[in-house]
């Protein structure tokens, strides 16, 4: 095993396997502790679960709104799951979509239920700072309204519902709307203050039956990125 030293600090900086000439590294999440601890952030995850509803076309079923002017929210994953509660007769079920909302100055509070993100809720570690985001879920078929934002024209992600989503108990397995993986260049979606996300039902109203829609969002809050 050979070592590669830093030319400036003199400290050991890497190990290289002598047989395969491969660099040995240990991957870690990005640093979240700001200078002096004043901008301490953290890693978070939260899930919004609707009641059994028959969503109207293109309604907001879940949202995420970031408000911290001193930090950046890095979105690593947004995923959805749909479970049939009351049988659905044959109809078109258009893909669920994920939109980025800019200038998100007012939350969509009408028909929306605010999730509790205070205390340790959503934290990946108890000593992390309380998150600086709000998250709501649509309380009925009309979805959430009343917000003020400029929503991107095109969605940043979508998930098609399976043809089998008909009988009671059938489901769309948890499916990513967005994930910061190799397909996305490993680059998270970076949101600054008063930017956010909206998870939107397909363009066609669910004419018969009811479903429960779950949305999970995983993110980090950092001083800069």
Image: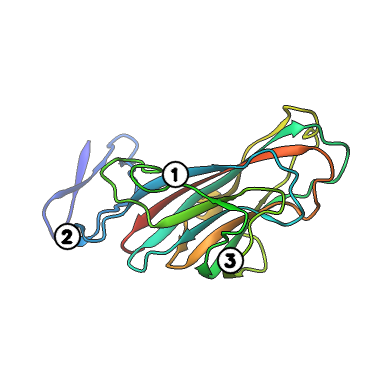
Q: Secondary structure at mark 1?
A: strand
Q: Residue furthest left?
A: 10
Q: Secondary structure at mark 2?
A: helix
Q: Is residue 206 above or below residue 190?
A: above
Q: Secondary structure at mark 3?
A: loop
Reading the chain from its start, which is encountered first: label 1 or label 3? 1
Measuring 42% from the left and 64% from the top, which residue is drawn there? Answer: 67
In the image: residue 162, left or right of residue 47: right
Reading the chain from its start, which is encountered first: label 3 or label 2? 2
Whether residues under marks 3 and 2 lie with C-beta atoms below 8 angstroms apart, the answer is no
Measuring 76% from the left and 52% from the top, which residue is drawn there? Answer: 56
In the image: residue 82, left or right of residue 149: right
Mark 1 or 3: in front is 3
Neighbourhood count class around disc 2 (C-alpha, 10 Å): few under 14, some 14–19, many 20 upward: few
Mark 3 or 2: in front is 3
Name the residue that disc number 1 marks.
Answer: 45
The circle on residue 147 is 3
Name the residue that disc number 2 marks.
Answer: 36
């Amino acid at each position: 095993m050979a070592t590669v030293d830093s030319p400036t600090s003199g400290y050991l900086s890497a190990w290289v396997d002598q047989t395969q000439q491969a660099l040995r590294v240990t991957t870690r999440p990005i640093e979240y502790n700001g200078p002096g601890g004043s901008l301490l952030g953290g890693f978070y995850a939260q899930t919004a679960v609707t009641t059994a509803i028959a969503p109207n076309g293109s309604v907001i079923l879940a949202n995420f709104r970031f408000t911290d002017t001193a930090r950046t929210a890095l979105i690593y994953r947004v995923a959805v799951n749909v479970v049939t509660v009351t049988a659905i007769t044959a109809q078109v079920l258009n893909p669920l979509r994920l939109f980025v909302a800019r200038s998100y100055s007012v939350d969509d509070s009408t028909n929306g239920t605010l999730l509790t993100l205070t205390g340790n809720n959503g934290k990946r570690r108890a000593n992390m700072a309380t998150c600086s985001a709000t998250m709501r879920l649509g309380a009925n078929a009309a979805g959430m309204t009343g917000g003020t934002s400029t929503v991107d024209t095109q969605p940043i992600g979508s998930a098609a519902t399976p043809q089998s989503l008909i009988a009671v108990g059938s489901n769309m397995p948890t499916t990513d709307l967005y994930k910061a993986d190799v397909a996305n260049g490993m680059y998270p979606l970076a949101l600054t203050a008063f930017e956010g996300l909206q998870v939107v039902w397909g363009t066609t109203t669910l004419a018969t039956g009811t479903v429960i829609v779950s949305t999970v969002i995983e993110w980090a809050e950092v001083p800069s990125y």
